Amino acid sequence: MRGTPSTVKSVQAQNQLIGVYQHTAFDPGQDSSRRIGREKQHGNNSTRILGLEVQGWRHDGSCSFSHPFPLSHLPLPADTELWEYQPRRKRNLRMAADSMEIDDGLYSRQRYVLGDTAMQKMAQSHVFLSGMGGLGVEIAKNIVLAGIKALTIHDTRTCETWDLGTNFFIKEEDVKNQRNRADACLRHVAELNPYVQVTSSTMPLDESSSLAFLKQYQCVILTETKLPVRKMVNNFCHSQRPPIKFISSDSYGICACLFCDFGDEFEVLDTTGEEPKEIFISNITQSLSGEVTCFENRPHKLESGQFVTFREVHGMTTLNGSMHEISVLSPYSFSIGDTSQMEPYQHGGIAVQIKMPKSFSFEKLEKQLVDPKYLTPDFSKPEAPLNIHAAMLALDHFQEKYNRLPNIGCLQDAEEMQMLAGSVVETLLSKPQLDERLVRWLSWTARGLLAPLAAVIGGIVSQEVLKAVTGKFSPLLQWLFVDAMDIVYPLEHTSREEFLPRGDRYDALRACIGESFCQKIHSLNVFLVGCGAIGCEMLKNFALLGVGCDSERGQITVTDPDLIEKSNLNRQFLFRPHHIQKPKSCTAATATFNINPQLKIDPRLDKICPATENIYRDEFYSRQDIVVTALDNVEARRYIDSRSVSNWRPLLDSGTMGTKGHTEVIVPQLTESYNSYRDPPDEEIPFCTLKSFPAAIEHTIQWARDKFESSFAHKPTLYNKFWQTHQSPQNVLERITSGDSLEGCFHVVKLLSRKPRNWSHCVELARLKFEKYFSHKAQQLLHSFPLDTRLKDGSLFWQSPKRPPTPIVFDAKDPLHLSFIISAAKLFAEVHAISFMETDLAHDTILKILSSMDIVEFIPSNKLVETDETVKKPDQIPVSSEDERIALLQLEGVISAGHVTKHDLHMNYLSFEKDDDSNEHINFITAASNLRAKMYNIEPADRLKTKRIAGKIIPAIATATAAVSGLVALELIKVVGGHPFEAYKNCFFNLAIPIIVFTETAEVRRTQIRNGISFTIWDRWTIYGNEDFTLLDFINAVKEQYGIEPTMVVQGVKMLYVPVMPGHAKRLKLTMHKLVKPGVDKKYVDLTVSFAPEIDQDEDLPGPPVRYYFRPENN
């Protein structure tokens, strides 16, 4: 690849990196051969250009790169020619951007959020973003990670010291050199995604500017822009045909706002992003209302006004393929209109939701200023949005009048703001009662910025940008207002001097919360569990806030056992391509330190679980001020919650799934904990449904995943374990001949006798599996239950949701059939350590092997087919005496054939890996699932959907993770301040709809025992004992100290004392040491006690945990 100066287009101001000359970055203000922008790698002599590792320099000045991205998508100027070196010839590779294929390795989690159509639209979009302050850089980060085509970042300001506390890409040298903020951020933003062309602009943007240059953009975002300019740009964008989507947003002090205008008619093809619902039908009435009833245990979850179509309806066949608007009658029924003239319904049928386009109309900013349409995020404060609108409009007028923001803590400026706000209220059609406190605090803090608030609004703005350029999801109509008044309410009487700047990176934060509050944050010890997408965003917020940067006290401890994968780079913005396969925690710690060199971070690689309690003891938790989780599973959350509660530590939990997010605040003595509530368990697919009666593609995918695990993981594990336990096949033969029953012997011997020896055997084995799975299985079911089979009530056995199978006849010309054969054969070869060449995969080679096979005709058996949905999968399949006889013959055969070498007695175990496209795992599952779907007449799924379901992939996008992390950081500030219960807020949002809901945290509940004795989850009783302390002594000590006698004592799942249990009365004389058997380093044990009920036959009364110390208190 080589670019020449004549083909490089200048995209930036002089002295900025603008092109590539023979892979050497050149500075237009200097000699073009001077190399700049080369960064030394730690530990070696390699260099980096544009974020990519240089493998080696050639004699002509060109070089080779090491990176996982197509060269055509490097962030080079548009006119740069790309060349590819190939053996014996050179080929021009100038690529059109619109031919870009979606890089699933990078975008896989986001594809499940947006879909390919939206991703392709996004990859064609050009976006203009003005203002690279704390909010602007958040937006830039998120939309570049998402993968738009091109972004122009614009700013006219130079870097200042307090930008270091708001913009995570600005460095101290940028401040020292007085660089333009856009130019300072350019390289860092561009490194986030090599597919996105990022340029900077420093031209003035004011009321005298020509706006013609904006015509090249599909979306324009303004931050830190004066109101007259916002109006002017909005009018220009709205007047274009098609209109340019316009977004303006600002975050000043404790307030933030967002405004959207996408034109008079903005069409959205998918308003929610949810999968279309499929409803199995049990009955349809022949009536004027046409009432459709679904099965009792499967609510339809539809809404009135939505549309459905039908398929597979028997009897009332006119409905098949027709579309109807529905009216919901109940959770299990809906009306579709007149069906009285249709044929009577017989059975079956599926109603499928149809996603209908929806048009949204937007008004221009000028009109919306006086009559705003807005989202209400906190229903306990319905007046807040209009109050914030009035206050921020007053701030705009103040800037117009004085050409500056109000001074920090200035009473005179605050009075002027109050007058301006009063005037603003008079201009509004809906006139709120002026919130003088809000206006005063906005005036005092407007020069500052809360980085977490910018992260919240930045995440939401970014999602609106993606909606604007893709037409995916419902847009915001048209305003969102958010404030952080809960943080500053307790600071009302703090001296104004506390908020004044001190010339350091924390001035913007200090302007909002004061110096003393800043010092509390700087001295925090925080334990962050997890360093994925939310973890990276949290570390960024910690760096900007200065968490743990005090010279004497404070530290961030972060742990994550995972290594960085390519798919992480789309959301976990602290990582780059050259970090792949490096530890997340260590890499993130280094990147965070680069944001704020004052931080103290201890990165660890431990998984937090019972197995690591010897490392993360109570002493560790007692040193932490706050625990923050950034986890992706419930089990880990429950464990961290239990450790936090037992050690009285505040816990901040959060999570995302696609565009949805939640936060939860857990504060000792004030709130309930994560474990106080139980989510309903995930609905399991019945065993008989998976095995014989699939009704949906999810069933066939799970079946295929189970087949993968059985064939390539479970069976090899069983096989290897058996031969590790038993000395030799000859010894096994002797034992089963003498009548011994060896566990797993039948299955292991069957595997050994069928073990493939070469590639042809692998192909043959795959073909036999095809016949068994997709032909014999169907024939056996139809033998057991012919199509005319009826139940005791006279109804047909084969009716919805049961679908009769159709045996599949193998066709070597069918790509799906061949796909299964090849992927299965490759996996069998890997399991059995059989090598094969690329030529072995040739179509003719495969056909030759298949054509030489004799396929045995199906012979039906009389085995029982399970139809009861409540029956679980059996742990073991019983082995008959005939099976044992066959195993004996098979084992004799392989021994006589000499197929019992060390190699023969070992199989390779395959661990399912969804993100490695070369390993055939997803290919096998996709082919197997779709063949089974075809067999049962179920709509197939493409590879992408199959991968999501089989891999249990949680859809994810950077916009939601940014917003969630900001919300958590705002609550962290409240926890540090020791705020009262009513200040804390949990949040749930779905940015797709969009909906944002703030709620009060759950207040801690007090459980009454009796006689005025009560407890909460935060209470713990304590008993100190000694080596001679008996169980009876323990019970008496509880009675003496707390006024109630325990009737049952439990340690974990072990019952120490239950009076009704035989022999337990004798335990009263045993020492506690003997009963609980403490470890060498164990100082105490946590026990659960309960008490006799006041009325006989009632359940025992629960009590708080009792911590029993093995030694007296003074020890």
Image (tube, rainbow, N blue to C red):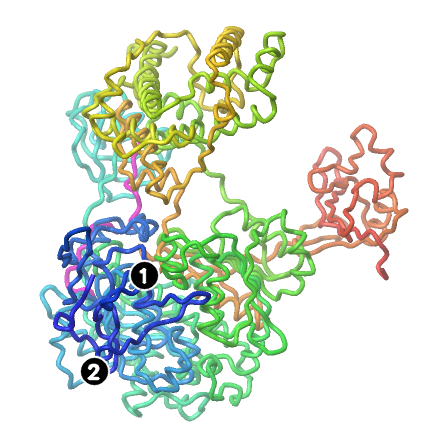
Percent of width and height locating residue 883 = 50, 10
Tag 1: Cα neighbours inside 10 Å, few (<14), some, or many (≥20)?
Answer: many
Checking the image for residue 930, the label placed there is none
Tag 2: Cα neighbours inside 10 Å, few (<14), some, or many (≥20)?
Answer: few
Q: Nearer the viewer, residue 678 or 1027?
A: 1027
What residue is rendered at 33% in x and 86% in y? Answer: 420
Q: Amino acid at mark 2?
A: Met
Percent of width and height locating residue 638 = 57, 49
Q: Which residue is mark 1?
A: 145
Count the numbered circles shown: 2
Could you tell whether 186 is left or right of 1043 in the image? left
Quadrant position of residue 443:
bottom left
Q: Is residue 371 visible in the rendered structure shown here?
A: no
- Tell me if residue 271 is in the magenta stretch: yes
Q: Amino acid at mark 1?
A: Leu
Identify the element where label 2 is drawn.
loop
Question: Magenta segment, which residues?
Answer: 261-279
